[in-house]
Image: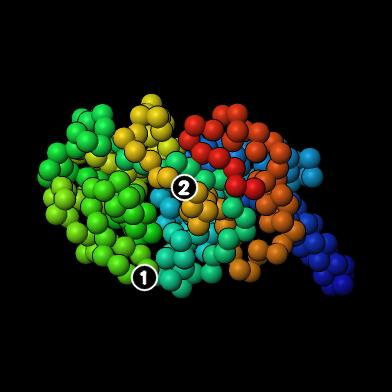
């Protein structure tokens, strides 16, 4: 009787394990990330997978959930952002594959071009290190500020602000859309601005040149990056269907990098 019970438990455990191996839990931010995961999910269903998508706009929460094992992967960030998270949280997140990049830029409700930006203008930029660095580099390239020579990430202490005496407002990424409505100039991503009907063509200026280190990546953990379901997820996320979606429906905002 005892042997039969052990056999039954072993069979149940095996069944549960096999079923669990066919469930992929992914945390994704809003459009187009969630749409890309949905397209990938359609590809994966053909292989018997079920993809569970959780929408999260707080990127740190999404990373903590992945680190804790609540998700198998997430899709919302670039590699530099993930690196800072790992450093600050003793994390073990890794890049699986880059999927797409976007045309980030600065937007304004008050001014139509760079030349009209006044001295003392209020400028909203991200408060996290990697995206603040990116925003400051764009402003420097546009000639609105200058940056001292250094290695590593730029922050506000590295700014020579004598050209326009800009008033910087560092805010969390989810707050940039609201800040755009209140300040003179605001940095943001196409996916965030599309939520309020603002397109890349409406930006005063955008980042120029390809900067692949900021590509949006599929991320997993060190302990599951080589699992079959992560390999299958990565393949589906870089499928012809995803590339077609990005080229047909997102070409004004971004582009595939695979």
- Up/down of 194 relative to 144, above or below: above
Q: Position of residue 208 (x, y in %)?
A: 42, 45
- The residue at the point 68 percent across, 56 percent down is 230
Residue 83 located left or right of residue 168: right
* Rendered-image quadrant of the N terminus: bottom right
Nearer to the camera, 12 or 216: 216
Q: Where is residue 127 in the image (x, y as percent from the top left)?
A: 29, 55
Residue 216 located left or right of residue 135: right
Circles 2 and 1 in contact, beta carbons < 8 Å: no
Q: Looking at the image, can residue 68 be seen?
A: no
Quadrant in the picture for residue 16: bottom right
Q: Which colour scheme is used?
A: rainbow
Nearer to the camera, 139 or 219: 139
Q: Position of residue 163 (x, y in %)?
A: 16, 50
- Up/down of 208 relative to 18, above or below: above
- The residue at the point 43 percent across, 53 percent down is 59
Label 2 crowding class (10 Å Cα cut-off): few <14, some 14-19, many 20+?
few
Q: Earlier in the sequence, mark 2 or mark 1?
A: 1
Residue 189 located left or right of residue 158: right
Which residue is the site of mark 2? 209
Residue 169 located left or right of residue 37: left
- Up/down of 150 relative to 76, above or below: below
Q: Element at badge 1?
A: loop
Label 1 crowding class (10 Å Cα cut-off): few <14, some 14-19, many 20+?
few
Which residue is the site of mark 1? 151
- The residue at the point 62 percent across, 58 percent down is 96
Q: Position of residue 138 (x, y in %)?
A: 34, 49
């Amino acid at each position: 009787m005892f042997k039969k019970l052990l056999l039954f438990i072993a069979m149940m455990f095996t069944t549960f394990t096999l079923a669990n191996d066919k469930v992929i839990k992914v945390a994704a931010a809003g459009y187009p990330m969630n749409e890309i995961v949905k397209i990938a999910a359609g590809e994966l269903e053909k292989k018997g997978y079920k993809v569970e998508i959780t929408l999260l706009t707080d990127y740190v929460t999404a990373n903590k959930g992945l680190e804790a094992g609540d998700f198998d992967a997430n899709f919302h960030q670039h590699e530099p952002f993930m690196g800072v998270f790992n450093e600050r949280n003793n994390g073990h997140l890794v890049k699986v594959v880059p999927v797409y990049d976007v045309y980030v830029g600065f937007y304004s409700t008050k001014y139509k071009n760079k030349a009209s930006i006044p001295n003392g203008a209020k400028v909203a930029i991200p408060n996290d290190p990697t995206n603040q660095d990116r925003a400051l580099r764009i402003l420097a390239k546009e000639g609105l500020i200058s940056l001292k020579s250094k290695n590593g990430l730029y922050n506000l202490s590295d700014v020579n602000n004598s050209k326009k005496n800009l008033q910087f407002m560092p805010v969390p990424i989810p707050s940039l859309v609201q800040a755009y409505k209140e300040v003179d100039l605001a940095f943001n991503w196409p996916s965030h601005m599309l939520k309020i009907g603002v397109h890349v063509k409406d930006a005063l200026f955008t980042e120029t040149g390809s900067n692949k280190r900021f590509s949006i990546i599929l991320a997993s953990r060190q302990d599951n990056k080589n699992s079959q379901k992560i390999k299958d997820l990565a393949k589906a996320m870089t499928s012809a269907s995803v590339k077609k979606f990005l080229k047909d429906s997102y070409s004004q905002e971004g582009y595939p990098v695979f």
